[in-house]
Amino acid sequence: MKSIKLLITTSLLAIPFYEANANANLQYEVVSPQFQSQVQTLSATMTTNFATTQANLLYAIQENTRQISSAISVAVTQSSAGATQVIDARKIAAQGLATAIQAIGQQDKIIDTVLSYGSTGQGYNTCKVLVGNATLSNGKNESQKLAAKMVNNTSTGTGRLVHDINQVNKETIQRHRELFCTAEEAAKGLCTVSKLAGGDTNAALLFQPAKTNSLEAEARRSLRGNILGAPDVALNSVNGMTPRGQQYLFALNRKTALQAFPAYSLASIDAANLQTIKNENGELRSPNQMIDDVIGRYYGTEEAKKWQATMMNQSTRGLLVEMARQKGANIWLLNEDYERGLRLEGNLASLLLISADEANSKTKKSYQSIAGRS
């Protein structure tokens, strides 16, 4: 009974299930084809959309890749170009700097050259000073040669011998009256007053500049002859071979030797003040005037003022050049003093020998006087 009830109960419970299942099957059979159709349609649509999306994505990726590659290429090119430009710019800048440094160095050399060898580095009036110093040196050499020639150009020069001393004395007096007549002589009616009265006895003329072949030059020549004394008388060959003649000639040679230094000193003074050389301006000047010009360049003249003004603008080299010139001029003057000192020593030696001869002569005369009395 219980089994029957259970079965009936089970059957009753299964009826709704079968009904539901039947309804479900019915719905499946109706819905399934539509669902499948829609699923297929959706699947096809999804497949198509997926393919399209994939294609679009691949194209976008490729396009982006191409753009990125192009951008990278441009960036690399720009970077390379930028680096090249930087390198070129640096090279140009370095070249410009080198050129500037070279230009500055060249400019410095030009400036140094201008300062050293231009008007500020050569001292005062270089060309004029060079010509003046060279003229002075040449003038001194010519003066020495001229002095050697002038030693014996007097009518009563050293070592000159004459046969008629009276005739020489007359000629000397006559030349004096014609050229150097004094007021006292003119008052006595002996001659007419000369433009250079007493010039042949005026020793001051020796120290004044004079032109060659001038009246002053003639006066100095006569003065030197008057100081040296009258010429000696010549001997004929017969008398010259005698013992007294030989003694006379020996004494004459000794006298000539003792007068050599005074004669040359007088001729040297005369030649040093004779205007025989031309300066840079073409003016005739004596060697002593040239010395005055050199000294006057630095002291006490209008040119000295110009020299001082020039020194204010000189570079170190210019000042050193001018210092060297002054030292050179000083050495040149010291040499002149040295040569003058040598002539002075020669004159003193001659004077000493003459004094000794006079002393010996007096001693001999005294001895002979005493010996004669005894």
Image (cartoon, rainbow, N blue to C red):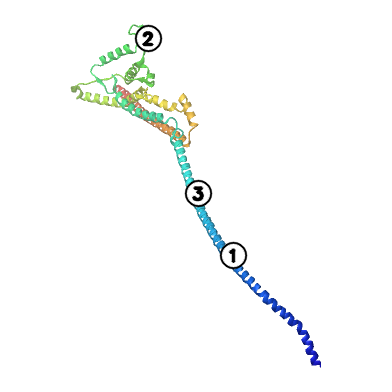
Q: Position of residue 95 (x, y in %)?
A: 47, 47
Q: Residues within 10 Å of mark 3 (few under 14, many from 20)?
A: few
Task: Name the residue that disc number 3 marks.
Answer: 89
Q: Which of the two marks, 1 or 3, is nearer to us in this view?
A: 1
Per the image, label 2 sits on a secondary structure element best described as helix
Q: Which of the two marks, 1 or 2, is nearer to us in this view?
A: 1
Task: Name the residue that disc number 1 marks.
Answer: 53
Task: Name the residue that disc number 2 marks.
Answer: 183
Q: State the residue in front, 180 or 157.
A: 180
Q: Is residue 125 above or below residue 217?
A: below
Measure how far apart labels 1 and 3 are at the Cα level.
51 Å
Horizontally, residue 194 falls left or right of residue 77, namely left
Q: Residue at x 78, y 84 (%)?
A: 13
Measure how far apart labels 2 and 3 are at the Cα level.
101 Å
Q: Residues within 10 Å of mark 2 (few under 14, many from 20)?
A: some
Q: Position of residue 227 (x, y in %)?
A: 34, 20
Measure how far apart labels 1 and 2 are at the Cα level.
151 Å
Residue type at mark 1 is Thr
Lower sequence index among marks 1 and 3: 1
Q: Which of the two marks, 2 or 3, is nearer to us in this view?
A: 3
Q: How many marks?
A: 3
Q: Is residue 100 above or below residue 17?
A: above
Q: Residues within 10 Å of mark 1 (few under 14, many from 20)?
A: few
Lower sequence index among marks 1 and 2: 1
Residue 250 visible somewhere in the drawing: yes
Per the image, label 1 sits on a secondary structure element best described as helix
Q: Quadrant of the N terminus?
A: bottom right
Q: Residue at x 59, y 67 (%)?
A: 48
Q: State the residue in front, 268 or 54.
A: 54
Lower sequence index among marks 2 and 3: 3
| Residue that sits furthest to the left in the current view | 238
Residue 258 visible somewhere in the drawing: no
